[in-house]
Image (cartoon, grey):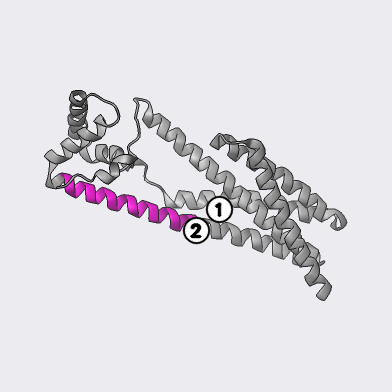
Amino acid sequence: MPIRSQRTPSIRHRSVDEPQGGQITSRLNWLRASVMGANDGIVSTAGMVVGVAGAAVSNEALMAAGVSAAIAGALSMAVGEYVSVSSQRDSQRAELEIEKAQLANDPRHGLDQLTDLIEATGVDRKLAHQVAVQLTEKDALAAHARYELNIDPDELANPWQAGMASMLAFTVGALIPLLAMLLSPRPVAVPVTAISVVMALALTGVVSAHLGRASKLKAGLRTVGGGLLTMTVTFAIGSLIGIQM
């Protein structure tokens, strides 16, 4: 069985503390995804309610449009994330099945390959072989999954969890412009909503930048600028439609 050398570049330098580090990274990724989901809820719902408000419709119509936008967006996020993560999980399982069959077909080659992978992280060849033997005796598939495929068999992506998290994050974000619009006196509803959205987007931008160790100022300006542009365009379109009604 030929060595699948094309997977070697995905090897990461590992340390004794990596399992804990991997869990922390996974949590940070989930948190970052939640922040961005909330950001989507803020921008899309703000665009909807501001646009409808620009058309000068009744409060009832505005409420119906805003609630419908929030529900539709949350469900769309949930379904999209579920489908995406399900595809990722299916791909991971397929890779594990292929690796399992190859190890069963030629375990000796699997041991040599694992030794090569461990040695590539900077470990002495003799020690790498000893580690490979111990890992193989414990769980050969798990060892190859982590070193060769960069997959943790015990931590496969959960599509249901991803879908629910995305839906919740979007809903939380959507409530900010929706409540600001509905609870404010109609004459000042649009500016109050705009201010609420700007503050919320600034917060999500800063948090996402902090998690990604990027510039907080740039991230905040991008998210706020995108939200303002969205509200400006939708309000202008809504106003034009309102004039024609």
Q: Is residue 139 magenta?
A: no
Dot 1 amino acid type:
Met
Q: Residue furthest bottom?
A: 245
Residue in the picture at 20% in, 32% down: 115
Dot 2 amino acid type:
Gly
**Between 139 and 32, the one nearer to me in the picture:** 32
Quarter holding the C terminus? bottom right
Q: Is tag 1's residue or tag 2's residue first in the polypeptide sequence?
A: 2
As displayed, is residue 173 above or below residue 53?
Answer: above
**Between 118 and 199, the one nearer to me in the picture:** 118
As displayed, is residue 209 above or below residue 82?
Answer: above
Figure quadrant of residue 106 = top left
- Near mark 2 (Cα within 10 A), the count class, few <14, some 14-19 or many ≥20, is some
Task: Report the disc number at residue 73.
Answer: none
Percent position of residue 182, x then y? 77, 56
Figure quadrant of residue 75 = bottom right
Residue in the picture at 42% in, 34% down: 23
Asked if residue 9 lies left or right of residue 131, the reply is right
Q: Is residue 83 magenta?
A: yes
As displayed, is residue 47 above or below residue 129?
Answer: below
- Residue with the mark numbered 2: 80
Residue in the picture at 73% in, 43% down: 199
Residue 91 visible? The answer is: yes
Q: Are marks 1 and 2 in contact (CB under 8 Å)?
A: no
| Main secondary structure found in the magenta portion | helix
- Residue with the mark numbered 1: 167
As displayed, is residue 61 above or below residue 131?
Answer: below
- Near mark 1 (Cα within 10 A), the count class, few <14, some 14-19 or many ≥20, is many
Percent position of residue 17, x then y? 37, 26
Q: In the rendered structure, which segment of residues is drawn in magenta?
A: 81-103
